[in-house]
Image (spheres, rainbow, N blue to C red):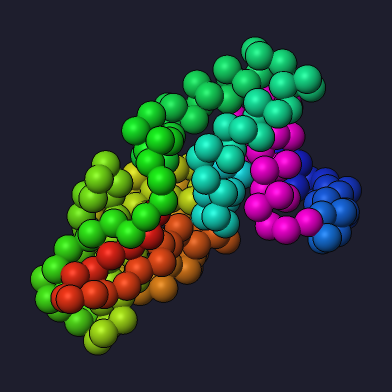
Amino acid sequence: MDYLLEVRGEALIPYFSFLKEAGKHLDVKTRDLISVITKVDAQTEKGLKQYLNRALANGCAANEIIDALLMAFPTLGLTKIIWAIDIILKMDLPDFTPDMLQHKQEWIRICAADEISSGTVQHLKVEKRNVFIYRENNSFKVFDSHCPHRSEDIKLEALDQFTLTCPRHKWEFDIRTGQCLKNGSHPLRSFTCKVENNTLYAFW
């Protein structure tokens, strides 16, 4: 795709514009679920990984994604659905583990709020999910450690000051905001968080 964009961008860019315009009346989650289904139908592994991450980041639950694939059974067929599930399992996303699929979204205890000093970053494993936590005064941010590009689980060693770099394709993120700074266009997946009785919670 990168090659075709380089040598035939004048043909492909209007096509991508058409797709964006065609879905403007759909809510984000519905558009993302349709995109996942189209990538499975075309059996495009790179596209499936990218749109799967995008769907999760935009609020689609793993169960919703699985339901969308199963609802598309008449057009996808069992072979393509199993192909997609195999790829999803190899991505090793916590959301798709059997126990997490049965887990009802709730407030999850992350740590004691005073364990994180203002202006610092922590990397913790919380209920099978690796997260980065950034604190600025009394404001906290909690981010999933997986890169939104190809789901690489980014380790603490990839953090330099406040810049987090995915080792696979060098996407760079500002860990204070989650925004992508270089080589990509999608932010880290963030979780709503709150502090109660000196305890930091995140909702997933």
Question: Seen from this angle, which residue lies furthest bottom?
Answer: 137
Question: Seen from this angle, which residue lies furthest left?
Answer: 115
Question: Which residue does the image show at 29% across and 60% down from the upper left?
Answer: 132
Question: Which residue does the image show at 51% across and 40% down from the upper left?
Answer: 62
Residue 86, image x and y in percent? Answer: 50, 21
Q: Of 143 and 6, which appears nearest the observer?
A: 143
Residue 169, image x and y in percent? Answer: 45, 47
- Residue 17 appears in the picture as rendered: no
**What segment carries the magenta color?**
26-49
Q: Quadrant of the C terminus?
A: bottom left
Q: Left or right: 173 with respect to 35?
A: left
Residue 81, image x and y in percent? Answer: 62, 21
Q: Of 145 and 107, which appears nearest the observer?
A: 107
User: In the displayed structure, would residue 67 be above or below residue 26?
Assistant: above
Q: Quadrant of the N terminus?
A: top right
Determine if the magenta segment contains residue 39.
yes
Residue 201, image x and y in percent? Answer: 28, 65
Determine if the magenta segment contains residue 124.
no
Question: Which residue does the image show at 40% across and 35% down from the upper left?
Answer: 102
